[in-house]
Amino acid sequence: METPFALSGKKVWVAGHRGLVGSAVVRRLERENCTIITAGRDEVDLRRQAETEAFVEKLRPDVVVVAAAKVGGILANTQKPADFISDNLAIELNVINASFKVGVSKLLFLGSSCIYPKMAPQPIPESALLTGPLEPTNEWYAIAKIAGIKLCQAFRRQHGCDYISAMPTNLYGPGDNFDLNASHVLPALMVKIHNAKQRGDETVTLWGTGTPLREFLHVDDLADALVFMLANYSGEEHLNVGFGSDVSIRDVAGMMAKVIGYEGTFVFDTSKPDGTPKKLMDSSRLMGMGWKPQISLEKGLADTYRWFLDHVEEGLRENKA
C-alpha cells in the first residue's frame, strides 16, 4: 500500500463533470473535505490549448481528474474517426500539460476497456495492453486513450509527477446516454424494454443469441474507486476497475424486465452479431489494495431506472406535450 494522499483541503478539478463518470466523481467528492472545481464547455474548450492553460493558471487546482472525452458508440466512431482521435488527443494533452505547468500535485487519467486488444486473454490483466490488434470499430478512441496513459507515464518518468491512470469496465448508472442510436448495451436494453411495456408489446427482440458475457460496474462504484486510488495509489501502471464478475446479456435482460415490470418474452435475432463472447477485466490488483464494489447489478439497475423515469422519460413526455 502506498502512502495515503490526503484530499482534505485540496482544490480538485473534475474535467468533464457533466458526463456519466465526471458527474459521479463530483457526487463522491462531495463527501470529502475538498473544494470541487468544474467548468462547462461554455467556460473553457479543452480542445484549445490557450483556453485550457489560461483556465488552469487562473484556478490552480491541486488535483485533477481527467474524465473529459469525446465518446460515442460504434456508429459514431465509424463515421467520425478523425474527430474521435484528434479531439481526445487534444483534450488529454492540453489538460495534462497545463496541469504540469502549474504544479498539480496529483492527476488521475480515465481510460476505457477498449484500450485492450480485441483478442485479449480473459479476464483481461493490465499487462495485456499493446499486446495485439485493437477492435477496429473503436480503435481511434482507443489509440487516443492509450496515448493518455503513456503521457502520464512519461511525465512520471521524466518529471517525477504523481500522475496515475484507471481503466474502468462497462459502466452504467444515473446520467447515462439513453439515445438508442448512440447508447451502450444496458441503457439500450432499458429503453427497449420500457418502450415495450408502455406499448403493451408481448415480445422484445434483442440482437444475437443472448449468450455473450459482459461485466457491468455502477458509475458510483467507479467514482468511489477513483477517490480510493487518488488517496492510496501512486504507480506507473494503470489499474483496472471492474465489478469482478460477468453476466450474460440474456440474464441481464431478465433482470431489467423484472425492474421495469415487463412481463413479456424475449426473441433473439441470431442473424445479428454477438460481438466478443466474453469481456471481463482482471481487477485483482485494485481489489488487493482494499477497494471493493458495493452496488449489486440488481440494485444498480433499479437505481438507474428510477433516474431514467425522473429525467429521461419525463423529458420525453414534456416534449410530446
Image (cartoon, grey):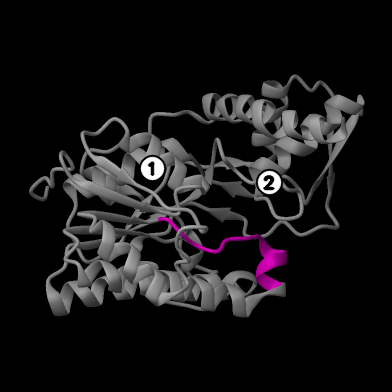
Specify the label residue 25 is tagged with: 1
Local packing at callout 1 (Cα closer than 10 Å; few below 14, some 14-19, many 20+) is many
Q: Which residues are magenta?
A: 67-78
Closest to the camera, between mark 2 and mark 1, is: 1
Q: Secondary structure at mark 1?
A: helix
- Identify the amino acid type marked 2: Thr
Residue 302 picture location, percent across and down: 59, 24
Residue 67 seen from this side:
yes
Specify the label residue 151 is tagged with: none
Residue 135 picture location, percent across and down: 58, 71
- Identify the amino acid type marked 1: Val
Give the mark nearer the N terminus: 2 vs 1. Answer: 1
Q: Is residue 308 left or right of residue 224?
A: right
Residue wearing tag 2: 211
Task: Tell me how far mark 2 sits from mark 1, CA to CA.
Answer: 32 Å
Q: State yes or no: residue 76 in magenta.
A: yes
Residue at image x 32%, y 52%?
A: 13
Look at the picture and state if 68 lies above or below 161: above
Local packing at callout 2 (Cα closer than 10 Å; few below 14, some 14-19, many 20+) is some
Front-most of 38 and 253? 38
Residue 130 seen from this side:
no
Look at the picture and state if 90 lies above or below 241: below
Residue at image x 21%, y 75%?
A: 155
Residue 201 picture location, percent across and down: 92, 29
Q: Secondary structure at mark 2?
A: loop
Residue at image x 50%, y 47%?
A: 18
Question: Furthest-left residue in view?
Answer: 3
Residue 241 picture location, percent across and down: 38, 49
Front-most of 68 and 176? 68
Q: State yes or no: residue 319 in magenta.
A: no
Look at the picture and state if 192 lies above or below 303: below
